[in-house]
Amino acid sequence: MNIKLPPDQEQWLKARIADGEFASPEAAVQRMIADRMALEGDDFAWAKPYLDEARAAVARGEVVSVEDAIADIDSHLASLKG
């Protein structure tokens, strides 16, 4: 199989190969397809305990407003910046 990439994608791939992320174009395509296949096959059953925990917290009234959540995130970002 021969694959023709647009120039920007070809340059991106060549840079990733040069960085050692992929051994070859074939290895890159194989890994990307395997990753996509795994994603499509994932039923997200692993997330169910997290959803159950979040739903229980909401039922207990353990929630914050969107505004408070954004303010908290902004505060954390500001502390990381310096």
Image (tube, rainbow, N blue to C red):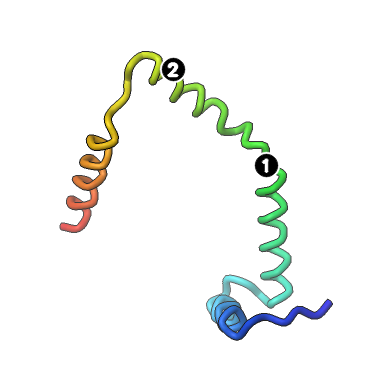
Numbered label attached to residue 52:
none
The picture places residue 20, in percent across and down from the top left corner, at: 57, 75
The picture places residue 23, in percent across and down from the top left corner, at: 66, 75
The picture places residue 32, in percent across and down from the top left corner, at: 67, 63
Q: Is residue 2 above or below residue 64?
A: below
Q: Earlier in the sequence, mark 2 or mark 1?
A: 1
Kindly state the secondary structure of the residue where label 2 is placed: helix
Residue at image point 57% right, 28% down: 48
Residue at image point 22% right, 47% down: 74
Kindly state the secondary structure of the residue where label 1 is placed: loop
Q: Amino acid at mark 1?
A: Asp
Please count the marks in the image: 2
Left or right of 56 in this view: 24: right
Q: Is residue 78 above or below residue 64?
A: below
Q: Residue furthest top?
A: 60
Q: Amino acid at mark 2?
A: Ala
Q: Are marks 2 and 1 in contact (CB under 8 Å)?
A: no
Judging by the rendered image, the residue that carries numbered circle 1 is 42
Residue at image point 26% right, 42% down: 70
Judging by the rendered image, the residue that carries numbered circle 2 is 56
Q: Is residue 52 above or below residue 77?
A: above
Left or right of 64 in this view: 5: right
The picture places residue 40, in percent across and down from the top left corner, at: 69, 48
Kindly indicate the quadrant of the structure image that contains residue 11.
bottom right
Disc 2 versus disc 1: distance between alpha carbons?
24 Å
Quadrant showing the C terminus:
bottom left
Kindly indicate the quadrant of the structure image that contains residue 35.
bottom right
Left or right of 34 in this view: 9: left
Mark 2 Cα shell of 10 Å, populated few (<14), some (14-19), many (≥20): few
Quadrant showing the N terminus:
bottom right
Kindly indicate the quadrant of the structure image that contains residue 75.
top left
